[in-house]
Every structure is written in structure tokens, then in C-alpha cells.
Image (cartoon, grey):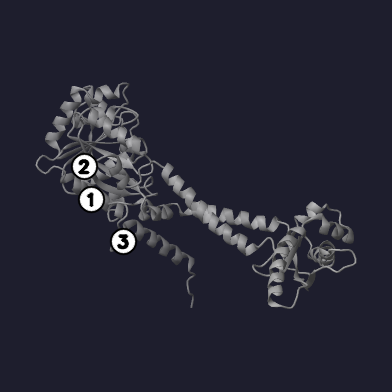
Amino acid sequence: MELQDYLRVVRKRWRVIAFVTLLVLALSAAFTMMSTKIYASTTQFFVSTSVGDNVAALQQGNTFTQQRVKSYSQLLESPKVLDPVIEDLGLEVTPDTLASQVSSTVPLDTVILEVTVTETSPQQAAKIAASIDKVFPKTIEEIERVQSGEGSPVKVTVVKPADVNPTPISPRPSRNLALGLVLGLLLGFGVALLREVLDTTVKSQRDVTAVTHKTVIGGIAYDGDAPDHPLIVQVDPRSQRAEAFRVVRTNLQFIDVANPPKSIVVTSSLPGEGKSTTTANLALSIAETGAKVCVIEGNLRRPRLLDYLGFEGSVGLTDVLIGRLDVEDVLQPFGRTTLSVMGAGPIPPNPSELLGSANMERLIEALSARFDYILIDAPPLLPVTDAAVLSTVVDGALVIVGAGVVAKDELKHAIDSLDAVNGQVLGLILNRVREKDGSGAYGSYRYEYVQESERQRAKERRGRSKETKKTPAHVT
């Protein structure tokens, strides 16, 4: 992955990163609040030796003292020192337990011994450190005495007595929260990156080109309002989505200038990719140019197209294929446009056989003589074979790719199913593209100037109307 890919993951999954970061911060804060406060009391000893007054003797004594201090650091945690401290303070602990609370350090090239005692009470920590102040020098004097009745050559002096420090050394809220923030960001980014890697759905044109070399002829942005207003080309002709359908229309017209396709099946890999709404809006976009368009509801299993267009589907394609009605009896004009609609009719028990029959071929030929374009809304490719069968009797197929809906391997299998029957894939339309997923030719570009849409103006008018109603009239 490149830097741009990581930035795209952050933009897309920022909610996951923020949630994990806040969760880790909350856990850090809870851990800090629930942790027992630990206090420390520190004392320092200076170790000296009795030597001659010449330079060589002083140097030898200094070296001897530095070596001795290292041993004293270990001796501090032994029962020899700690047993008298326990007895002096009347503590109910073992020497090993007390040793875990006592630590000592020797600064480099010095004869200073620094002792730190930790406890849950600052007063108790100071008492233990003060007891060590009294016990440790006596213990060293006793150990270092060569003969009875003689003085010790080593002297330990307290240079910093123990005192009460009311500030706890643990926990440290600022440090814990800072570590929690850093850890939360790292974990959040890791979770976001893992979700991105495990998410195999198609999200952008780059994902499509990684699966197939078929041409992407357009991209339609995601619109959460689409279920309520499926015919965006008619409802809001100045919107970005409506303009995107016109771009698809233009690209479709230039696919093969010498031999332009007239009969086209529109399908997808799975249900829910926006196949029927795309078919309806594309048909309306083509009809805007004055071309004669016939859109056929070729989904004989779960027909939805006529519901979007606002027609009844009691008669339609199946009636024509079995010879019950003529084409003229089932074609319905769409308002004052050059668009005609043919519904599915009664749902048959054998959709694939009807769609692949000779009657279907003759119907396509007859309609091709009357219309400039024939768009057939077909079922998805993977669940059933209807669309693959239809692709053999038309000039080509358009495959709708639902961003975030279809997986890459599912798209590949769908394209392979068309190739297996020698169906011509005219192009792919990337649908439901979200702005945060846009990485490629579609879904990431914005116009610097966009005309105000009809829906925007309608919302503004409703807002002004409500404000007018709320404003009381001025009475003079």
C-alpha cells in the first residue's frame, strides 16, 4: 500500500479510529482512577573510608569506597538490614516483602547511595526510610569492623534524611493518558487497516480495474434519498447524480461509433446494486436527446422497474412471448417523452427458457426496427442465468457494480459468466459510490461550479415558508 492508500483508510475509517482511541483513553482513565496510589520517600548516604593523607592513599581509598558502595546497595535489601527495621517499626511483613518496597541506586563514579522506599501511605514510607537511616550506618559499621573494640574503616553518613512526600509517584494521570492516546491511535489505525484489508467489496474504479479490464463508462454517486426518489433524472434534472447518468449516456453512445449497440441488457452481479433504478434513469437520459427508447422489464422473477416508473404490470413481456398479446398491446408511453415501457407481465414458471427463446429474438429484432435503443432490465447474474441468456440475443450487456455491495470475486464470476456464453460486455457502471471511497476516475472529482438543484431550492422554499409562519405579524 502507498501513502495515499493509508490516508484513504484514515478518511474512510476515521470513526473506527476515533472510537478505538476514545475506548483506550477511557480504559486508561479508569485504570488510573482505580489504581492504588503509591508514595515514595528517599534518603541518601555518603560512604567514606579512613586512609592516609597522601595522594596515592586517597586514590586507593576512593576506589575501595566505590567498590564497597556497590556491595552496600545489595546489602540494603537483605534481612541483615531489614529485620531491625521491621522490629523497630513493628511491621507485620517479611524481609522479602519489605525488600520489594526498597530500591537503591548508585550514581556513576560516586560514593553516594540513594535509597527509595515505596508505600501506599506517604507517612509510612517516610517512617521506613527514617528507620533505614538509623539501622544502615550501624549495620555497615558492624560488618566492616575488623577486630572487636576497634573502629570501622568505613563510615556511612546520612546526607539527605527521609521526609514525607505527599505527591504520589504512581499512577501518573498525564503519562497514562498520553500513552493511552498514542496506543489508542495505533490500535485504531490497526483495526481500520485490518477492516480495510478484510473488506473485499468493490468500492472504487481502482478495485474494478483490479478485477477486470472491461471499461468503466461512468460512476453514480450514492444517494440515501434514492429509494424515495428513484427517477432522479426526472425529479432533480440538475443534480450531480442526474448529470452522472448523462455522462453514462454519452459514453455509451461512443462505445462503438461504427456499429453502435441498440439492444442492451442491464444486469448486475447481485441483487441490491441499483440495477433497476440505473436502467430507468439511463432510459430517461437517452430519451432526453430525442432518441426513441424502449425499456423492457426483463426480470421475470422479481420485477421492480414498473414500480419505479409508476406503471401497472398486469400485462407485458410474457404475454408477447407466449403469443397472447401483440407488442402494441403492452407498450406504454412514458408521459410526453420518446420513452416507451414494456412490463414483465405475469411471472412464468420458466423465465430462462422464455428469455432465450426464438420469440424473444424476433421481439428484439422487431423492436430494433422501431426504436433507437432497447434497454432490458434483467435479473442479477450470479443467482440465475437469465441475464447471461439474454446477453446472447442482444448487442451487449451493461453490468452495474454496486460499491460496497459486491465483492471482487463475485464481480469476476459475473463477468466470467457473460464471457462463457460469448456475451459482449459493453461496459461497467460503478453505482452507489461514496465520496470517502472515491479513489479513481469516479467518485472523487467535484465540480467547482454546480447549479442549484431542484430539491435544494424546494427545501429552501419550505424552510422559508416555515420561518414565515413562525414569525408573528406586526400589528400597528
Answer whether residue 316 is visible to the viewer in this image: no
Badge 3 marks a residue whose secondary structure is loop
Q: Percent x, y for residue 28? A: 62, 56
User: From mark 2 to mark 1, how far is it between C-alphas?
Assistant: 19 Å
**What residue lies at 56% left-to-right and 56% top-to-bottom?**
22
User: In the rendered structure, which amino acid carries the disc numbered 1?
Assistant: Val
Is the residue 218 above or below the residue 122 in the image? Answer: above
**What residue lies at 48% left-to-right and 50% top-to-bottom?**
190
Foreground pick, 413 / 468: 413
Q: Percent x, y for residue 444? A: 32, 55
Discs 2/1, front: 1
Question: Where is mark 2, residue-wise?
Answer: 339
Q: Between disc 3 and disc 2, whose residue precedes?
A: 2
User: In the rendered structure, which amino acid carries the disc numbered 2?
Assistant: Leu
**What residue lies at 48% left-to-right and 74% top-to-bottom?**
474
Q: Is residue 145 left or right of residue 269?
A: right
Foreground pick, 233 / 188: 188
Q: Which mark is residue 452?
A: 3
Q: Is residue 81 left or right of residue 257?
A: right
Question: Where is mark 1, residue-wise?
Answer: 247
Q: Are marks 2 and 1 in contact (CB under 8 Å)?
A: no
